[in-house]
Image (cartoon, rainbow, N blue to C red):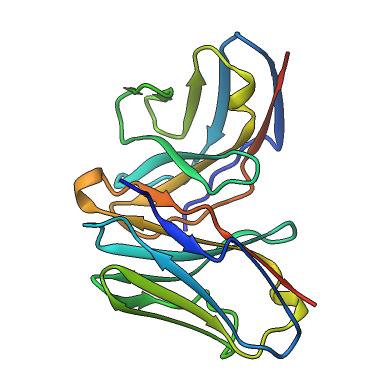
Amino acid sequence: DAKTTQPNSMESNEEEPVHLPCNHSTISGTDYIHWYRQLPSQGPEYVIHGLTSNVNNRMASLAIAEDRKSSTLILHRATLRDAAVYYCILRWRDDKIIFGKGTRLHILP
Amino acid sequence: DAGVIQSPRHEVTEMGQEVTLRCKPISGHNSLFWYRQTMMRGLELLIYFNNNVPIDDSGMPEDRFSAKMPNASFSTLKIQPSEPRDSAVYFCASSSRDRGYGYTFGSGTRLTVV
């Protein structure tokens, strides 16, 4: 399985943008890049996904490097409610999702 | 849309007892997944179903664990007999091709085996 590498933890100030990096140097041409997050005491929730082009939705933006070996999840204006573990996952089409350790994001008031 | 519904939310049982966890997926979703989460091992995929048929159960820890999906609106995960090391949060998730394959997770069942 293609793997992803994320920092264990990050901190950001409230109301500032947050850039969460993910390295996936062994990504294959058919792997989609998915992001999920898990708020405290809740199940994971889908955030965004993309293949080659940058993607935006109401929750976040996904910036994908031209060589697809890395990507960045962007929260444009972090709030305290964005404190969570963020998972970057490579997924082939509708194959099963395997979670790694993710990045624990701390938001400072 | 009530989301994925799991029951019970919390379960405390004695070692050796049978435990049954329940899941109702989102109506129209054709895939269902069972995950387990512990501090040590993180989120682990146990088994998943497509159109009520088990596709991959390679994550099921051992024969004490079994899962069924008798119809499109209901699934169970059973542990018999339960052991203290089974203590974890068990999540059910469902997905549909029409939603770009994103998963919707339930709130989980926190199982404690004493």
Q: Residue at x 47, y 52 (%)?
A: A2
Residue B90 spot, x, y in % from top left = 57, 64
Q: Residue at x 49, y 77 (%)?
A: B77
Query: Extreme right residue here?
Result: B114
In this rendering, is residue A75 above or below B75?
above
Question: In the image, B112: left or right of A53?
Answer: right
Residue B58 spot, x, y in % from top left = 48, 77
In front of the other: B60 or A93: B60
Q: Residue at x 47, y 29 (%)?
A: A71
Question: In the image, B92: left or right of A104?
Answer: left
Q: Quadrant where the C terminus of chain A lies?
A: top right
In this rendering, is residue B3 above or below B51?
above
Q: Residue at x 28, y 52 (%)?
A: A93
In front of the other: B11 or A45: B11
Residue B42 spot, x, y in % from top left = 65, 56
In this rendering, is residue A101 above or below B56?
above
Question: In the image, A105: left or right of B7?
Answer: right
Quadrant in the rendering for residue B23:
bottom left
